[in-house]
Amino acid sequence: MGYDLKKENHAEVLEFYVKDTGIEIPKGRQTEIFKRFAQADISNRMAFQGAGLGLSISKAYVEMLGGKIWIESEEGKGSVFYFTLPYNTPHKEKTFKLKENFSKKTSAKGTLNH
């Protein structure tokens, strides 16, 4: 599990990833698992029960925030799930040079000495 800051189409994105060493998800099922109530075809379904909603909900949130979600899976190595979210680099605050003599402040009533 981790993240990277990457450039994508002249914009910065945060790319998050989660690796597992579990079952491989066949290429033909990799887009299907992001649909509601869909599950990967596995030989022992009882070992990996679920409603098939987690990835579809994750996909909806990621896309709502302007990102993308996908999977890379390799036989014998498990799967890596990725998603990106737009990231705006905070701008540095601008600094302003103050007048050198600021030991006296002026108010509507007159000068204040410090």
Image: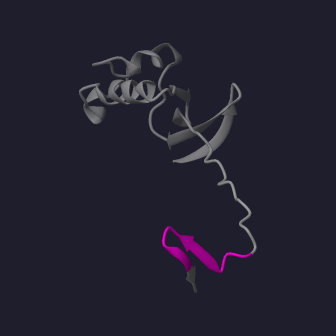
Q: Which region is colored magenta?
A: 101-111
Examine the rendered structure and indicate whether residue 61 appears above or below residue 90. above
Q: Is residue 106 magenta?
A: yes
Q: Tell which of 59 and 63 is nearer to you.
A: 63
Q: Which residue: 40% across, 21% down?
A: 34
Examine the rendered structure and indicate whether residue 84 appears above or below residue 104. above
Q: Position of residue 46 (x, y in %)?
A: 25, 31
Relative side of 6 to 51, left or right: right
Q: How is the image coloured?
A: one colour
Relative side of 78 to 4, left or right: left
Q: Which residue: 33% across, 27% down?
A: 57
Q: Is residue 87 magenta?
A: no
Answer with the quarter of the image where residue 105 lies.
Answer: bottom right
Relative side of 13 to 42, left or right: right
Examine the rendered structure and indicate whether residue 110 appears above or below residue 98. below
Q: Position of residue 23 (x, y in %)?
A: 45, 33
Q: Position of residue 80 (x, y in %)?
A: 53, 35
Count of marks overlaid on the render: 0
Residue farthest along the top direction in this orientation: 28
Residue farthest along the front direction in this orientation: 109
Q: Position of residue 3 (x, y in %)?
A: 57, 45
Q: Name the quarter where the C terminus is drawn.
A: bottom right
Q: Tell which of 18 and 4 is nearer to you.
A: 4
Q: Tell which of 72 and 11 is nearer to you.
A: 11
Q: Which residue: 53% across, 17% down?
A: 27
Q: Which residue: 32% across, 31% down?
A: 54
Residue farthest along the bottom direction in this orientation: 114
